[in-house]
Amino acid sequence: MIRQKAQGRKNNETDVLLVIKGKTRHRISEFSKFTEQRELLFDKGMRLKFDSFRETKGSRIIFQMTEI
């Protein structure tokens, strides 16, 4: 799926993945059309601490964050 998406990507587009270590998440997969994306909702007002980022060989940027 990711390779197919990357092939259709424009020159100015970048894939970004947010990895959040959280405490107050709520899974919404059962309500989503895109269940393979494992979508979550967080409580209003949640604060995040930026931990790190890295770029993969396939031009994907991964941000690591922690709920505080």
Image: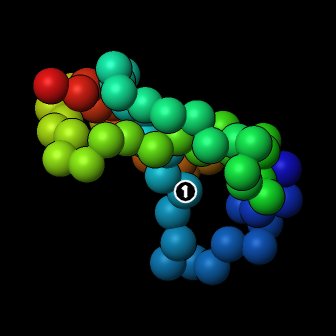
The residue located at (17%, 47%) in the rendering is 45
Residue 66 lies, in percent from the top left, at: 25, 25
Residue pointed to by mark 1: 15
One can see residue 57 in this view:
no
One can see residue 51 in this view:
yes
Residue 60 lies, in percent from the top left, at: 53, 48
Q: Secondary structure at mark 1?
A: strand
Task: Name the one closer to the observer, 45 or 4.
Answer: 45
In the image: residue 10, left or right of residue 4: left
Count of marks, rendered view? 1
Corner quadrant of residue 46: top left
The residue located at (55%, 56%) in the rendering is 15
Residue 37 lies, in percent from the top left, at: 69, 44
Image quadrant containing the C terminus: top left
- The colour scheme used to paint the residues is rainbow
**Mark 1 is on which residue type?**
Asp
Corner quadrant of residue 54: top left
Rendered position, 6 above or below 2? below
The residue located at (16%, 39%) in the rendering is 47
In the image: residue 44, left or right of residue 7: left
In the image: residue 36, left or right of residue 45: right
Task: Name the one closer to the observer, 52 or 65.
Answer: 65
The residue located at (53%, 72%) in the rendering is 13
Q: Residues within 10 Å of mark 1 (few under 14, many from 20)?
A: some
